[in-house]
């Protein structure tokens, strides 16, 4: 469910015209719907309401401060995987006690900063990490709440790059070793090892893997309790699938129906870490057609953004719905379409958003929307080929706000040392032109 719709043939984000946003802000631009991601957060919270679950938004999906701030106001916790993400959460007003800190290679600095901030829970991935957190916590004379991440060796039936709960993945420890680590460390003074964490993957559209993984983890918890090792919390990560094609995702209540009975029987506090589920369908990437080229049997639609702005298609072979911002119809079977490859400007053959995709005929200057781009879009963007990263815009009703300005050429070299003096006149001329265009854009 999202709040992007066509009205009189023009795409709108909530009640704001995407064409008008692009005209004022330029392209490429990410546009997010507040109503969509707040509604999805509330759906997650509502589905597990009877358990009073802690819903921790996964910051890696999209960490813009404006988005985090609105989720914090809704009472969200946050799942972070780096010191930088923790910094973002705290800047956005998130509560440290409602933060889970995951990641397989936390540095001493990150651990120390998290302890100083008072994070609610460390998701620990190895025995060495467990011992290191204990060492740093002891030196600071504080206690660290710790969940041991268990790898249940369950196939989530998703892409291999976003599978995290199989034996060959780098995440967590196997069930047998997990039991051993609980027995060895549950009485360690600097840490409170009283929680289990698991996360089996992302974009999961089948409830069966959750049932299988929970069954294995529940058995572990029962065995530990039989040895008087108490487990108070169970963090099952996230991974609930969203709509990319339009019909693949399940209602989150289908997952809740599988998860809730197990958690109630165990009598533990449930923690969830959804990211894509909350923000994925809440964002689109809007690009401008630069050229249309026919080469042999192929027609290429060339956009002003590519894998530098949205790497998922190149990295995962991921599908995104792609359609013109202005269109008389919204499905290929409703009118005349052409089969094209939709590509970007990056000098890589992998820079393809879609191959053999049917869309209405477009021309230079037309706007194209890439849907379901709210998660792992800007968050994974880069300056490859020295391409400035896109602007980001937040829409509420019929109003929109720029929540990240478009990068400039100066941003591309910020932090670098220019060790050789060169003739600066051409550069100064270019900078003046860039500043003039920026001023003209702001005046609009």
Image (cartoon, grey):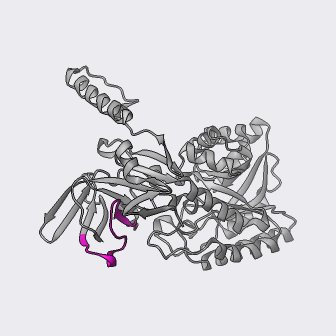
Residue 126 appears in the figure: no
In this rendered view, identify the residue nearer to me: 254 or 399.
399
Q: Position of residue 360 (x, y in %)?
A: 27, 68
Q: Is residue 71 above or below residue 301?
A: above
In this rendered view, identify the residue nearer to me: 439 or 137.
439
- Identified at 25% across, 29% down, the residue is 433
Q: Position of residue 33 (x, y in %)?
A: 52, 54
Q: Quadrant of residue 126?
A: bottom right
Could you tell me what secondary structure mostly forms the magenta stretch? loop
In this rendered view, identify the residue nearer to me: 286 or 89.
286
Q: In the picture provided, is 363 more to the left or to the right than 11?
A: left
- Identified at 29% across, 50% down, the residue is 304
Outermost residue toward the right in this view: 228
Q: Quadrant of residue 214?
A: bottom right
Outermost residue toward the left in this view: 296
Outermost residue toward the front in this view: 8
Q: In the picture provided, is 95 more to the left or to the right than 166?
A: right
Which residues fall within the magenta stretch?
Answer: 319-339
């Amino acid at each position: 469910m999202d709040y992007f719709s066509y009205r009189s043939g023009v795409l709108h984000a909530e009640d704001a015209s995407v064409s008008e946003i692009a005209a004022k802000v330029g392209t490429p631009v990410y546009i997010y719907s507040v109503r969509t991601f707040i509604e999805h957060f509330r759906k997650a919270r509502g589905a597990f309401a009877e358990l009073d679950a802690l819903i921790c938004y996964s910051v890696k999906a999209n960490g813009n401060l404006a988005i985090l701030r609105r989720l914090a106001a809704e009472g969200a916790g946050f799942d972070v995987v780096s010191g930088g993400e923790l910094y973002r959460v705290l800047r956005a007003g998130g509560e440290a006690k409602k933060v889970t800190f995951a990641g397989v290679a936390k540095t001493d600095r990150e651990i120390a900063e998290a302890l100083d901030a008072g994070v609610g829970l460390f998701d620990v991935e190895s025995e060495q990490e467990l011992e290191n957190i204990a060492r740093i916590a002891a030196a600071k004379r504080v206690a660290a709440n710790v969940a041991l991440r268990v790898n249940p060796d369950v196939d989530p039936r998703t892409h291999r790059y976003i599978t995290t709960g199989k034996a060959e993945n780098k995440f967590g420890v196997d069930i047998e070793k997990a039991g051993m680590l609980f027995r060895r460390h549950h009485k360690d003074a600097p840490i409170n090892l009283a929680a289990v964490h698991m996360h089996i993957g992302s974009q999961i559209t089948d409830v069966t893997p959750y049932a299988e993984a929970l069954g294995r983890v529940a058995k572990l918890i029962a065995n530990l309790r039989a040895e008087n090792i108490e487990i108070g919390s169970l963090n099952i990560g996230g991974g609930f699938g969203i709509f990319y094609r339009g019909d693949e995702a399940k209602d989150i209540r289908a997952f809740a129906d599988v998860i809730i009975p197990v958690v109630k029987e165990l009598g533990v506090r449930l923690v969830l870490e959804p990211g894509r589920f909350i923000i994925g369908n809440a964002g689109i990437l809007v690009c401008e057609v630069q050229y249309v080229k026919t080469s042999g049997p192929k027609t290429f639609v060339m956009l002003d953004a590519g894998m530098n702005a949205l790497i998922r298609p190149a990295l995962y072979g991921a599908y995104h719905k792609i359609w013109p911002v202005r269109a008389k119809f919204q499905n290929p079977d409703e009118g005349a379409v052409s089969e094209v490859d939709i590509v970007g400007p990056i000098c890589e053959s992998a820079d393809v958003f879609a191959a053999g995709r049917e869309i209405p005929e477009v021309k230079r200057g037309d706007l194209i929307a890439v849907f379901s781009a709210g998660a792992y879009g800007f968050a994974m963007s880069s300056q490859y080929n020295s391409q400035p990263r896109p602007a980001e815009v937040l829409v509420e009703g019929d109003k929109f706000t720029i929540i990240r300005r478009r990068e400039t050429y100066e941003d591309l070299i910020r932090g670098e040392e220019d060790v050789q003096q060169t003739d600066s006149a051409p550069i100064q001329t270019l900078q003046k032109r860039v500043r003039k265009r920026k001023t003209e854009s702001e005046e609009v």
